[in-house]
Image (cartoon, grey):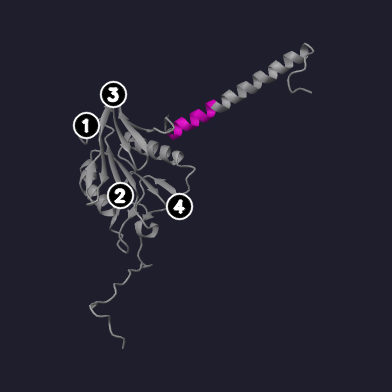
Amino acid sequence: MVAKPYGLDYDTPRVPEEDPSVFYPYEDDEPMAEDDRQRRVMIDVSESLIQYYSDRPDVYVSADIFVYYEMNNPRRNVAPDVLVSFGVKDRERLSYFTWREGKPPDFVLEVSSPNSWRRDATVKRDIYAEMGVTEYWRFDNNRGQVARRVLVAERLNAAGEYEPLAITQQDGALTAYSAVLGLDFFARDGALRMYDPVSRTWLRNLREEIAARQLAEERAQTAEERAALLESMLREHGITPPNGD
């Protein structure tokens, strides 16, 4: 028998192992949102962030997905309205497991509703702090009539507690800066928009991105038609167009 080193009268702690028989549900009977306005904000913000990080294979963005934060305990879960996690593979998931990914999400947004805003501000806030979510944001798209505050932004400090981020007014909007995302948020008229201060561009939601692409295609087609018409007119007058045969 090998004696323990002097002063180390304890057993080496065992690393917990995941029980393969434990089932983690990836859906429930709850709707994604309570109404169209809440759903629109969730989709617009998540789709804007997905497009913004589309060239980053190490950034994962999702909406209304279960996050499990305790191994072998499926009751320990939460479903953020929007989450962003850096340093993990961008791939489709049924659920997000903090121990499998090696980290919690870095950013979480909850869109307040009449039935959720109290839980968002208390129970979920404590859960996200326990998990180690760096920034936790809450937005009331009913202009503060539900949660009493339109925009709340908080950052986790070294003590594991959330501290408020500065929120200011600019051109009739409430605005705050997310250091985690490197983006400015603007809340106005029930909408939440994001702005990249480096490129000085607004992030587009999916509808805006589709419209912008269609407009670009229409302009390109119009330019081609004008060029073809000009070439035809020049040839009619016996003029060889530039780069012509």
The three-letter code of the residue at mark 2 reads Val
Q: Quick one: quadrant of the N terminus?
A: bottom left
Distance from the alpha carbon under mark 4 to that under mark 2: 18 Å
- Residue ID for mark 4: 89
**In contact (CB < 8 Å): disc 3 and disc 2:** no
Q: Quick one: quadrant of the C terminus?
A: top right
Q: Nearer the viewer, mark 1 or mark 4?
A: 4
- Residue ID for mark 2: 133
Q: Position of residue 63 (x, y in %)?
A: 37, 44
The three-letter code of the residue at mark 3 reads Gly
Image: magenta residue range: 205-215
- Residue ID for mark 1: 145
Which badge, 1 or 2, comes first in the chain's sequence?
2
- At horizontal 35% and vertical 50% (from top left) the residue drawn is 105
Q: Is residue 36 above or below residue 127?
A: above
- Residue ID for mark 3: 172
Distance from the alpha carbon under mark 1 to that under mark 3: 17 Å
Q: Position of residue 23 (x, y in %)?
A: 36, 62
Distance from the alpha carbon under mark 3 to that under mark 2: 30 Å
Distance from the alpha carbon under mark 3 to that under mark 4: 38 Å
Distance from the alpha carbon under mark 1 to that under mark 2: 27 Å
Which badge, 3 or 2, comes first in the chain's sequence?
2
- At horizontal 28% and vertical 57% (from top left) the residue drawn is 76
- Figure quadrant of residue 140: top left
The three-letter code of the residue at mark 4 reads Lys
Say which of 133 and 2 sits in front.
2
Say which of 59 and 9 sits in front.
9
